[in-house]
Image (cartoon, grey):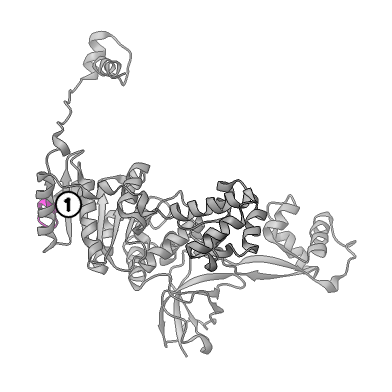
Amino acid sequence: MKFADVILPLALPRNYTYSIPEEMEDTVIAGCRVAVQFGKNKKYAAIVKAIHEDAPEAYKTKSILYLLDKEPIVHPQQLIFWEWIATYYMCTEGDVMHAALPAHLKLTSETRLIYNAEYGDDFSALNEEEYLIAEALHIRKELSIDEVLQITDKIQVYSLVKQLLDKKVCFVYEELKEAYHPKKENIITLHPRCNDEATLASIFDEVQRAPKQMETLLAFIHLNKTEGLVRQTDLQKKAGVSAGIVKALADKNILVIQKQTVDRIPSLRKDRTNENFKTFELSNEQQKASEQIHAFFKEKQTVLLHGVTSSGKTLLYIKLIEEYLSKGKQSLYLLPEIALTAQIIRRLQEHFVNQIGIYHSKFSNNERVEIWNKVKSGEYKVVLGARSALLLPFKDLGLIILDEEHDASYKQQDPAPRYHARDAALYYAQLFGAKVLMGSATPSLESYYNAQSGKYGLAQLKERFGGMQMPDITVVDMKQVQRSRKQEASYLSPALKEAIQQSL
């Protein structure tokens, strides 16, 4: 018999072993989610960590209930990485799993109440609260705990549920449901018979007397050329028509309506990108820094790029990512959450088009699942994100860039795992044999020490891009100002106020 060690999304001191049913032995593999029962009733989606033939001696194993994935949702490197984070930052692998997986991939069973038909419809023996639930169950046959909460004013409903169970009004069972559902929309295409110009011309003649159908057909041709994928909702909005007009064209075998799975995150068309941006050249100072980075990467895993503000570090990052793209490798570009602005996102999207994925806290749970899957499959070659993007399931990572590496927001405070993305990135890169480039105008003390001592390579950008001069800095002693002018405490000195007024 085979057994599987699984990681549950709970803060448990160790992982648990479950037996694999004989019919699942060929399909259960490490990295897949399986449904398991933990405790008396509760069911969870657990990640299979390892498969072996050693039965645990301390307890009798429960059997895996069923398989949730046809293929692993995490790669072997992620499982090793999770274990390292749990050990190094003194938490559990369940904590790491909980932090890493999008919410819609972490499934916990829902308690549901089923009405006992043998009880009948005589509720006279029940109190007022019990009667309300029993009546609802009698009508609807089944209720969730959330629905019970809506019916009664009691915050703690479990005691009420227990009373109903004791009186055999209902039964309970645990249901594990997939939370992620692909988005499906009606997609419009041209009927195959309309592919040649002669047929298309005759079709225009055919709809000449139907102005709305003509407008819809013209709108379709325009959207098909500019957008590629034509959604029915977009077509109706563009043409200003109802669904009936689109259906009429489909009935005439002019258009085809098909229900298709679509991405929640829209793709960026290549003809909308800024092609001029791809022709930029590095300055002499940037070229020197680039050569330093490449030289250090030949013998070191990590390089610190110490570049003054506005020295053009981002251009260097982009050039480096391009090199790893040409090798077929994925790149991770980490930024503090506050620096993940619309400007940097747009800049990289215009450059890398649909090869780049953005990962941050503003995405919905369904969108996060789609990004997760695209990173796992290697469809996204470049990922731009904040701290949590480090926990994505990269397939073939070649480069990690940590911009503003000194920033305190790279450190997770609460809840566990309380990891430091900068330090954890170094270990993660080792698992792939990847390189790490840290950038900052004001490096952290520990990173600068590691660079000075030779543990990291040290590349420098000492000049601002485009020959811009550094701003003049004037030190103002605020205590002296307040003492001499007998002013109240203020954050603004007279010199600063004057400069602000001049700027305005």
Magenta residue span:
450-458
- Residue drawn at x 26%, y 56% is 423
- Residue drawn at x 53%, y 88% is 23
- The quarter in which the C terminus is drawn is top left
Q: Nearer the viewer, residue 316 or 111?
A: 316
* Left or right side of 213 for 323: left
Q: Which residue matches tag 1?
A: 304
Q: Amino acid at mark 1?
A: Leu
* Left or right side of 85 for 199: right
Q: Residue 343: give x, y in percent of width and height.
A: 34, 42
In the rendered image, residue 178 lying in the magenta stretch gets the answer: no
Q: Nearer the viewer, residue 151 or 355?
A: 355
* Left or right side of 357 for 319: left
Q: Nearer the viewer, residue 268 or 154?
A: 268
Residue 501 appears anywhere in the view: yes
Q: Secondary structure at mark 1?
A: strand
Q: Is residue 121 above or below residue 449?
A: below
Residue 56 appears anywhere in the view: no
